[in-house]
Image (cartoon, rainbow, N blue to C red):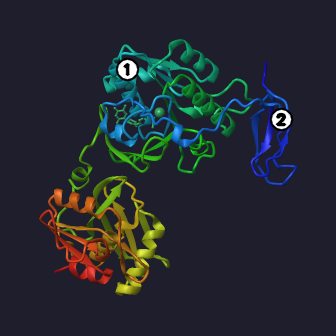
């Protein structure tokens, strides 16, 4: 039997039996979305006998969940210390970034560790294609089961029969419910299928990993609609031209968000990188102008990265500004501050900024390193090779304090940097050293440039 569906306007909430391009109620375009009609089980509210009971918070026993530990420390940390039974975890990322690779490795590890069946459902690739990847990854676990299937109902049947330890669904966009008319990958299908897996996970305690694709254009049926439903959302990011991959938790009901794990894509799959700073700095050319080292925080972990900048006289009416790894609007702001507050004539210069290693930095604490790199490139004066830089820049060229300074200083000192420029508001008055590294508090961008760029 087909379930009854209606079309609900996402703008005004009105529902209609037929689809229309424009909502007849509110007049918005393309807002009607198909939904399964839920059969009302009971009649009016007054007749309902309560099935749940409010309890005083003090009467709720505090229980510690036993997490399933993953023998991959980077992944374990991003999840907040392992997999919580019954949780649904979305792994999102652009096509080709390595989601299937990571999850096949994970599934194989879990099958080995638990000696229980682990089910890897692939809606996109055939069993033979997965076998080829598995051969590359040297995966040969008897307990790892591959299912090439796209029907939600079929998959749930298999799960019920098999009772796997963990389920991987690759990808949620490929799965469809036979009870919905929308095409696989549409918002309705993605949402309904995700809820079905969520229900299964909660009732059986089986953890589920869902793969979700995001496109550069911000696919409408992408993981955004899923983020509310699932327990954790992890983004696998990285530049396809670089080997580094960063797994970032953007939501986690059972742990901290913005935790990151760093991996490197190799011939045999993704390998953990326990000391990312060392790798990000490995290819650095010392004493080249236009390069500065920033100390950034990724979650609770400090990371040293090289910021490179190149300026060259423009041949356009409007000079070009290109930012790779930092926000373009942030770069424009820093160029404006350098022009106005420090008197650098960048108005007829093309400016290119690149964060080495293909990682993306969102925090403003790298402002000062970016500004120093630009000034260094423009004036053709190198920054001392043993100088690390931290600081957010305000519009009047002042340096603003940044959080977690101790962790940043510790990491810079550990990697052998001799000197670190910091905003004066971020260190205790009078502090001049940290673990043998010189700490140099500065108040303004101008002051910082005087120290960083010495001939
Ligand atoms: P894949 O996991 O298929 O990406 P996604 O599922 O996110 O679309 O991996 C894609 C890329 O990774 C592919 O271009 C090949 C590369 N790769 C390796 O470099 N080493 C490996 O061991 C594997 C399996 C893939
Ligand atoms: Mg894939």
Image position of 101 (left or right of 187): left
Residue located beneath label 2 in the image: 46
Q: Is residue 252 above or below residue 301?
A: above
Query: Is label 2 in a helix, a strand or a loop?
Result: helix
Regarding residue 265, the answer to whether it shows in the image is no
The spot of residue 278 in percent (x, y) is 21, 52
Observer-nearest of 370 and 155: 155
Place of residue 351 in the rendered image (x, y in percent of width and height, measured from the top left): 39, 72
Within 8 Å: ligand 2 and the Cβ of disc 2?
no
Which residue extends farthest left? 436
Quarter of the image for the N terminus: give it.
Answer: top right
The number of numbered badges drawn on the structure is 2
Reply above or below: 219 against 355: above
User: Does 453 sit above or below residue 26?
Assistant: below
Kindly indicate the quadrant of the structure image that contains residue 41.
Answer: top right
Q: Evaluate if marks 2 and 1 touch, with contact meaning CB atoms under 8 Å apart.
A: no
Q: From the viewer's perspective, is 175 left or right of 417?
A: right
Residue at position x 27%, y 79% in the image: 442
Q: How far apart are marks 2 and 1 (CA)?
A: 50 Å
Front of the two marks 2 and 1 = 2
Residue depicted at x 32% and y 81%: 444
**How many residues crowd mark 2 within 10 Å: few (<14), some (14–19), many (20+)?**
few
**Looking at the picture, how far across and down is residue 220, in whole percent?**
63, 46
Quadrant that contains the C terminus:
bottom left
What crowding class fits label 1: few (fewer than 14 Cα within 10 Å), some (14-19), or many (20 or more)? many
Viewer-proximal residue among 293 and 230: 230
**Secondary structure at numbered mark 1:** helix
Q: Can you give x and y, in whole percent of width and height, for residue 434 in the image? A: 17, 65
Q: Which circle's residue, 2 or 1, is located before the other in the chain?
A: 2
Which image quadrant is residue 73 in?
top left
Q: Mark 1 points at which residue?
A: 111
- Tell me the residue at 83%/49% (across/down): 23
């Amino acid at each position: 039997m087909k379930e009854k569906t209606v079309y609900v306007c996402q703008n005004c909430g009105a529902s209609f039996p037929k689809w229309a391009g424009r909502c007849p109620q509110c007049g918005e375009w393309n807002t009607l979305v198909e939904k399964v009609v839920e059969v009302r089980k009971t009649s009016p509210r007054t007749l309902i006998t309560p099935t749940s009971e409010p309890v005083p918070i003090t009467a709720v026993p505090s229980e510690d969940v036993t997490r399933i530990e993953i023998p991959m420390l980077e992944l374990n940390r991003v999840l907040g210390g392992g997999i919580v039974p019954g949780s649904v975890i979305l792994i999102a990322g652009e096509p080709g970034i390595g989601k299937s690779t990571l999850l096949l490795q994970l599934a194989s590890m879990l099958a080995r560790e638990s000696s229980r069946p682990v089910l890897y459902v692939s809606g996109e690739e055939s069993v033979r294609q997965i076998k080829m990847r598995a051969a590359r990854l040297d995966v040969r676990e008897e307990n790892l089961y591959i299912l090439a299937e796209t029907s939600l109902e079929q998959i749930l049947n298999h799960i019920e029969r098999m009772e796997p330890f963990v389920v991987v669904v690759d990808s949620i966009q490929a799965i469809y419910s036979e009870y919905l008319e929308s095409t696989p990958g549409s918002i309705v299908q993605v949402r309904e299928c995700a809820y079905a897996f969520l229900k299964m996970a909660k009732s059986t305690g089986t953890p589920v990993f869902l793969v979700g694709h995001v496109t550069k254009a911000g696919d409408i049926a992408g993981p955004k609609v899923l983020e509310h439903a699932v327990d954790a959302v992890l983004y696998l990011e990285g530049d396809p031209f670089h080997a580094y991959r960063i797994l970032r938790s953007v939501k986690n009901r059972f742990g901290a968000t913005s935790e990151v794990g760093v991996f490197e894509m190799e011939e045999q799959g993704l390998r953990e990188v326990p000391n990312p700073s060392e790798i990000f700095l490995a290819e650095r050319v010392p004493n080249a102008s236009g390069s500065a080292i920033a100390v950034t925080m990724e979650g609770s972990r400090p990371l040293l990265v090289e910021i490179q900048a190149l300026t060259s006289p423009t041949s356009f009416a409007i000079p070009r500004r290109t930012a790779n790894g930092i926000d373009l609007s942030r770069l424009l702001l820093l160029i404006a501050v350098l022009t106005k507050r420090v008197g650098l004539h960048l108005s007829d210069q093309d400016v290119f900024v690149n964060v080495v290693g293909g990682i993306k930095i969102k925090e403003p604490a790298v402002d000062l390193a970016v500004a120093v790199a630009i000034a260094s490139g423009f004036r053709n004066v190198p920054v001392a090779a043993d100088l690390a830089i931290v600081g957010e820049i305000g519009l009047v060229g002042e340096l603003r304090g940044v959080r977690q300074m101790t962790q940043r200083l510790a990491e810079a000192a550990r990697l052998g940097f001799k000197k670190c420029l910091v905003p004066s508001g971020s260190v205790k008055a009078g502090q001049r050293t940290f673990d043998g590294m010189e700490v140099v508090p500065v108040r303004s961008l101008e002051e910082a440039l005087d120290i960083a760029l010495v001939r």
